Amino acid sequence: MSLACSRSLFFMAFTAGAVALGASYYLEYAIGLAPCSLCLVQRLFLTLLTAVCGLAAVHGPQRVGLSLYWLAALGACLVGTTAAWRQVLLQSDPLLQLVECSPDPETLFSRLPWLCATLRMFNGSADCAEISWTLFDLSIPEWSLLFFVGVSILAFYQLLRLVCNALQRPLSGEASHQGLVRD
């Protein structure tokens, strides 16, 4: 994989993440939609994904660095996908018994241990099940899920491609085709 190709892929993922983050802040501050706890988790991992892709685009790493950046991007996407999937499930099942009000994340993390607060955020609240905005009949968590799945597929494909390229190259530095070595 050429350096220019990897940089352009990371830059495109960075740009898409920045646009998605901008849209989320626009919906919060200009439109007035208050994010629930699962929305904040998704936004956190979208920010992490965007930062990783932006750093990789600027850095322009070689094979090992590419693998690490794509693994970090895939990890952020998988956690974001999990949060988005949980919220889509909460929105699709109106009979779930949800807690009516949940404390804000600052209060939650200050009073409970980190793991318990994180699990409580993933349980969701009544705010998480409410569909407040749609575009083309898809809610915000559904759009978020599509984005995370798309970038996950890209990252997984790039990792698979890096592994296949590494397996085709010889480890000792010798030419893999003896016919090409002869003069």
Image (cartoon, grey):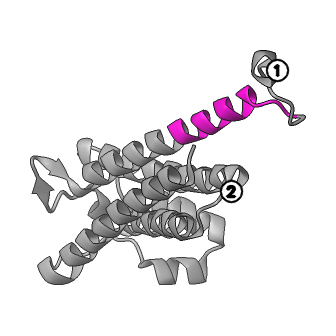
Labelled disc at residue 182: 1
Task: Look at the numbered discs 1 and 2 and tell me whether their residues touch, using CB distance below 8 Å.
Answer: no
Assess disc 2: are there few (<14), some (14-19) or many (≥20) residues with their C-alpha within 10 Å of its C-alpha. Answer: few
Name the mark nearer the viewer: 1 or 2. 1
Which residue is the extreme one toward the top?
179
Give the answer, above or below, for where 25 lies relative to 98.
below
As for residue 80 lying within the magenta part, the answer is no
Extent of the magenta region: 157-171
Residue type at tag 1 = Arg
Q: Which residue is mark 2?
A: 65
Magenta span: chief secondary structure: helix
Q: Vertical placement of 156 versus 23: above or below? A: above
Q: Is residue 161 magenta?
A: yes
Question: What is the C-alpha distance between the residues marked 1 and 2?
Answer: 34 Å
- Residue 100: give x, y in percent of width and height: 31, 65
Q: Quadrant of residue 24?
A: bottom left
Please name the residue shown 40% across and 67% down the image.
Answer: 43
